[in-house]
Image (cartoon, rainbow, N blue to C red):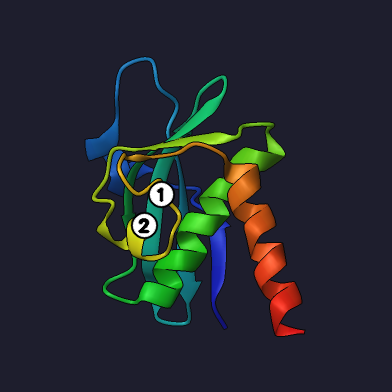
């Protein structure tokens, strides 16, 4: 069973450390270990994503990225700034088309509710 959990050990993500920034990470965990991750930090009104990787699995990448955005929403943050490659994020419509940002996480998440209603 797949779980996406807050990483307790940030040692593998030390290369993303920035002075004055508290890093967080989530990892997708399976019986075989870590199958993907995202490294990010919270600002006053923006979550900054430094890295997101799911070893080529687009559906897993979507789950990891949405986990970070959801965690930011729970803190009252509505914007995301991506310092990582945004190719997959743009495929998944998790990033504004002509920038490395998500200007409204709430709008993005509410849009997903509309897709669910269309399927029902």
* Residue appearing at x 56%, y 39% in the figure: 104
Disc ID at residue 95 = 1
Q: Quadrant of residue 16?
A: top left
Rendered-image quadrant of the C terminus: bottom right
Q: Are marks 2 and 1 in contact (CB under 8 Å)?
A: yes
Of 23 and 111, which appears nearest the observer? 111
Label 1 residue SS = loop
Residue occupying the far top of the picture:
20
Task: Give percent across and percent down for residue 13.
Answer: 30, 44
- Asked if residue 53 lies left or right of residue 74, the reply is left
Task: Give percent across and percent down for residue 10.
Answer: 39, 43
Task: Give percent across and percent down for residue 2.
Answer: 54, 77
Q: Which sits earlier in the primary sequence, circle 2 or circle 1?
A: 2
Question: For mark 1, does the 10 Å Cα neighbourhood hold few (<14), some (14 to 19), or many (20 or more) residues?
Answer: many
- Asked if residue 15 lies left or right of residue 26, the reply is left
Q: What's the distance in space between the residues labelled 2 and 1, CA to CA? A: 6 Å
* Residue appearing at x 52%, y 49% in the figure: 68
* Residue appearing at x 31%, y 62% in the figure: 88
Asked if residue 26 shows in the view, the reply is: yes
Disc ID at residue 89 = 2
* Residue appearing at x 27%, y 71% in the figure: 55
């Amino acid at each position: 069973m797949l779980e996406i959990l807050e990483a307790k050990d940030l040692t593998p993500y030390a290369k993303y450390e920035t002075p004055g920034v508290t890093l967080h990470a989530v990892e997708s965990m399976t019986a075989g270990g870590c199958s993907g991750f995202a490294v990010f930090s919270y600002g006053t009104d923006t979550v900054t994503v430094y890295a997101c990787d799911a070893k080529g699995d687009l559906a897993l990448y979507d789950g990891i990225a949405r986990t970070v955005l959801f965690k930011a929403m729970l803190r009252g943050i509505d914007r995301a700034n991506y310092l990582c490659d945004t190719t997959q994020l743009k495929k998944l419509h998790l990033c504004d088309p002509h920038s490395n940002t998500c200007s409204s996480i709430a709008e993005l998440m509410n849009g997903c509710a509309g897709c669910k209603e269309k399927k029902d």
